[in-house]
Image (tube, rainbow, N blue to C red):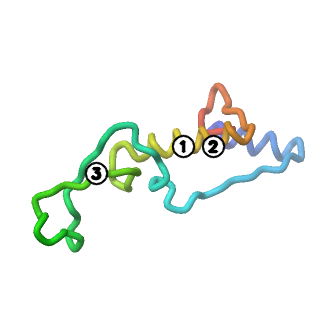
Amino acid sequence: MESVRLLIALAAHNCWKLHHMDVKSAFLNGELEEEVYVKQPPGYVKQGAEHKVLKLHKALYGLKQAPRAWNIKLDQTLVSLGFERTLFEHAIY
């Protein structure tokens, strides 16, 4: 949080423009690095295949890997657009 305050103070002092964003359903955009299987959710159970599990192709909310998968996807995207991550605060580009 101190890094964000410092960035805002520097921007105000130097008349820089700041941009922030919120990605809707962010965790659903992360690519999983390993195979993850889940039980069929209630209401979506396939008749005759109740015992089967489903393989995830993308991260889901509540999945412990979801925040990391989203961070990797965000980092790759921002770097490909020419942004550079700061050395001391990895959430600021």
Type of amino acid at the residue the image marks with label 1: Lys
Q: Against 44, is 17 above or below?
A: above
State which tag comes first along the sequence, 1 or 3.
3
Q: Name the residue under label 3.
A: 55
- Residue 69 location in percent, x, y? 45, 42
Classify mark 1: helix, strand or loop: helix
User: Residue at position x 10%, y 68% from top?
Assistant: 48
Q: Do the residues labelled 2 and 3 touch (CB within 8 Å)?
A: no
Return the residue nearer the eye: 71 or 45.
45
Residue at the image point whose x is 18% and y is 69% from the top: 46
Q: Which mark is residue 73?
A: 1
Q: What is the C-alpha distance between the residues marked 2 and 1?
A: 6 Å
Q: What residue type is labelled 2?
A: Thr
Task: Tell me which label, 2 or 3, sits earlier in the chain.
Answer: 3
- Lateral position of residue 57 relative to residue 70, left or right: left
The residue depicted at 37 percent of the width and 55 percent of the height is 60
Q: Distance between the residues labelled 2 and 3?
A: 25 Å
Q: Distance between the residues labelled 1 and 3?
A: 20 Å
Q: Is residue 1 above or below residue 45?
A: above
Q: Quadrant of the C terminus?
A: top right
CB contact under 8 Å: marks 2 and 1:
yes
Using the image, tell me which numbered label, if any, was put on residue 77. Answer: 2
Residue 4 in percent (x, y) is at 66, 42
